[in-house]
Amino acid sequence: MAVFPVEFPQRPVEFRSQLAAGYEERQEQFESKREELQKKINTLLESNKKLKNQSLDEEMDQIRKAKRYEMDVDGVITRYDSDVKDLAKNYSENAEHLKKEQRQLNDLREHFQKVEEENMAIMKEEAQHIPQRFFRNHGHVDGKSDLHEADIIVGEEDRESSIRRSKTGPTVAAPREKLDSLDLDSVKLESCSLAMGWGRQISVNVQASIGNYTLEECLGQGACSSVYRGRQGDKEVALKLREALDEDMIANCREEFEVLRQLRHPNIIQALDFFVLSQRTCLVLSYHDARNLTKAVKMGPMPEATTKPLFRMLLKALDYLHCKRVLHRDVKGDNVLVSHDDTQLWLADFNTARQLMAGGSLTMTGTWEYSPPEVIVEGESASEKADVWGAGLCGYLMLKGKLPLKFSAYESPRAYGEACVKNPVTCTDPSWEAFSSDCCETLRRCLHVDKNCRPAAMVLLAMSWLADSIVARRRLKPGRRHTLLSGTIEDGDGKAVPCIKKIQSLG
């Protein structure tokens, strides 16, 4: 079989050109897709790297937060342990203090019982030597006296003098020349047991002497003290007598004198002298012909025109105390003296007053009915704002003749404090329409349940209702901040008048 060779024709030039062009085009498309894929790969790599870094950062943040939380928990536990130890220590100290006070109370009761028995024995013994003419009609039967009902004359056998005590008649004084020589012990002027409710009171109204002073009249009695009007020569004084059976009681009485003798203000009573005599302390004070605010409003509330100057005097006294870094801690109606014409006022009874020390704390004291909510409910220490609260209640008492809430209506002090918070004094009910808006606003500020919104006495004196010559009396110091209900202002220019205008515009 014969094979014939086949010859292929040569491709034309145009065909080769087309093939070359197609190849180049495909090559460009491939390169373009490769670059696009490479970009996507790079983007994915970067995203993955970011996600890894972000996850790592989040994990590190969570670890840091966990460590901080652990440290906070450890700190809280440490503080809690410290507080528990402090509470246990305070409880132990308070328990010891209570035991000590209980022992003192038992000693006082025994002492008072002995005094009462001695007094009754003395009266029965002395009554046997009283001449017939000293018996009065009541209790006198056929020339014999009934010791339980008759007037009893206490004195020495050879004296025609003494102090008459009767259950039915008033006390009378024997001639002064017969009594000047009697000292406090022989007359048995006053015993703290009587003021505290143990035994019967032996009331005297004689001009007996104690130290260099002559007692003339009993002005009043408190929980464990009595106040007498006395005289030293031509000068009238007030003498506060207290029982002092140990050094602690004497130191407590002396502390009141030490605080008072540093104070000089026209609206604060002055301390003149202090001495201890026969288990009694005597604090000699300036005498003012006045009665306390509680008694002053028993006849009815005071008008606003009378209340404003009296309330201004009370706040000026507190402003002076607070500038001296002294807290009264018992501002109430019984401790505010008002003259009989309702024109003068004096702050009295500094038995609970204390000097503020740096870093020191104060325990709860004073009267529950006049204590602010932060002291009763929160258990905070008394501050200047507590004195302002008490002053506000005194102002309320002047205007209304009563307090906004009655403490005796509540079962506990805490219930009373919570009632003060739930029923704040707003001065908006119809009964306040008779008073000016400035008066109501000032009183509402004083009785604000939040102590941070309760202005200081100095700021209250600068408000429009009470502002008088405060600029001449005391310039506001440069750079000093004054707390107000809506914030604080800075009187950095040192000019008092513009600062007071700012205070009044905010008030």
Image (spheres, rainbow, N blue to C red):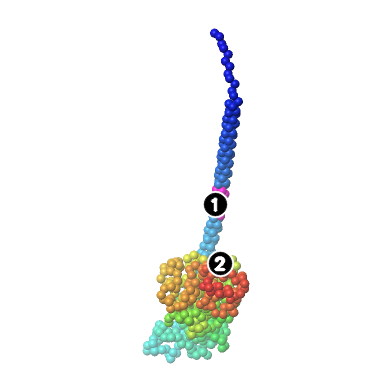
Of the residues under marks 2 and 1, which one precedes in the sequence? 1
**Callout 1: SS:** helix
Q: As rendered, which of 89 and 78 lies closer to the eye?
A: 78
Residue at left offset 61%, top offset 74%:
495
Query: Magenta includes 33?
Result: no
Q: As rendered, which of 330 and 177 lies closer to the eye?
A: 330
Label 1 sits on residue: 69
Please state the horizontal and vertical placement of residue 311, each as a whole percent of the image: 50, 78
Question: In this orientation, does residue 452 appear?
Answer: yes
Residue at left offset 52%, top offset 61%:
87
- Residue type at mark 1: give it: Tyr
Q: Which mark is residue 361?
A: 2
Q: Give, as a single range, the part of the protein colored magenta.
A: 61-75
Viewer-nearest of discs 2 and 1? 1
Please state the horizontal and vertical placement of residue 225, each as a whole percent of the image: 50, 77
- Residue type at mark 2: give it: Ser
Q: Is disc 2 in contact with disc 1, using a CB cutoff of under 8 Å? A: no
Query: Magenta includes 72?
Result: yes
Check disc 2: other Cα within 10 Å, few if <14, some if 14-19, many if 20+: few
